[in-house]
Amino acid sequence: MERDVYGEALYDYHALNALSEPLLLHSSYGDIEEMPIDVFFRDADDFPELEHIALALCDGHVLDVGAGVGSHALYLQEKGFVVDALEVSNTACEVMKNRGVREIIQADFFNLKVDKGYDTLLFLMNGIGLAGSIEGLRKLLRHSKTLMSEKGQLIFDSSDISYLYEEYRIPKPDHYLGEIHFQYEYKGQVGQPFDWLYIDQQALIALAHEEDWVVQILFEDDQDQYLVRMEPRKAVND
């Protein structure tokens, strides 16, 4: 059975409010960095402006995708929203439950099926990255339509990371620059490699239009991060 080293680090931090060893993140662009675990446990006072805007735009029944330990779900609960926290890590789901998240779904986003659609699909902290690739993002957008109500919207943030190839002086790959391979390491245990996507605005808009989505870029910060609201084109025309 695969070790959920990401979940183990979250659980240890929740239990002890500190880690005896860092959670490391290996990347395909050659860097190994320490993952600041406390970022997953922030409260509203520590949310950046981009996340506050995103949360203020939530409407109706919300699906918080890649909920982690539930910081955004807890905030929305306190505001009176009905919110389901979706997370693939069983250990992270246990932490969410301990923290007071009421509705938790342990599942892979791409395997999720619902009878009644969500009004908001929320992917914060570059949660859209779970698509893994440009083609994966097409699949994600198509699957999202099956999970949304007639008035459904998709809200997420991402960023342009092409600068990393110059910063680390590595050759540009044959695939899209924002398609990255990651791997967590914790207490000497290395987790399963996974693909993650960062997409620039121009590539996103082009792809979204091909898949019949309307795109609104709502906010940009000084670190090349941006916030997006999208809805299916047919929903706008109906």
Image (cartoon, helix red, strand yellow):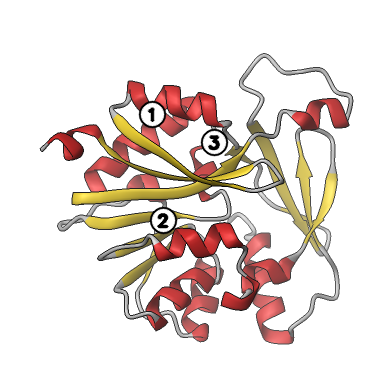
Crowd around label 3: few <14 · some 14–19 · many ≥20 (10 Å): some
Q: Position of residue 90 (x, y in %)?
A: 50, 67
**Disc number placed over residue 208 in the picture, else none:** 1
Number of numbered discs visible in the structure rendering: 3
Question: Of 188 and 203, which appears nearest the observer?
Answer: 203
Q: Position of residue 111 (x, y in %)?
A: 34, 47
Q: Residue at x 70, y 34 (%)?
A: 161
Please give the residue where the numbered disc 2 appears in the rendered image. 122
Q: What is the secondary structure assignment of the residue under circle 1? A: helix
Q: Position of residue 10 (x, y in %)?
A: 66, 71
State the CA–CA distance, disc 1 to disc 2: 17 Å
Crowd around label 2: few <14 · some 14–19 · many ≥20 (10 Å): many
Crowd around label 1: few <14 · some 14–19 · many ≥20 (10 Å): many
Question: Of 124 and 110, which appears nearest the observer?
Answer: 124
State the CA–CA distance, disc 3 to disc 1: 16 Å
Please tell me which of labels 3 and 1 falls first in the chain: 3
Residue type at tag 3: Gly
Please give the residue where the numbered disc 3 appears in the rendered image. 132
In the image: residue 128, left or right of residue 177: left
Residue 144, compared with residue 2, is above or below; it is above
**Is residue 67 at least partly visible in the picture?**
no
State the CA–CA distance, disc 2 to disc 3: 17 Å
Q: Residue at x 77, y 30 (%)?
A: 163
As drawn, which residue projects farthest toward the top?
Answer: 174
Q: Position of residue 109 (x, y in %)?
A: 39, 50
Q: Residue at x 23, y 43 (%)?
A: 146
Residue 177, compared with residue 53, is above or below; it is above
Q: What is the secondary structure assignment of the residue under circle 2? A: strand
Instruction: Report which quarter residue 19 is drawn in.
Output: bottom right
Residue type at tag 2: Leu
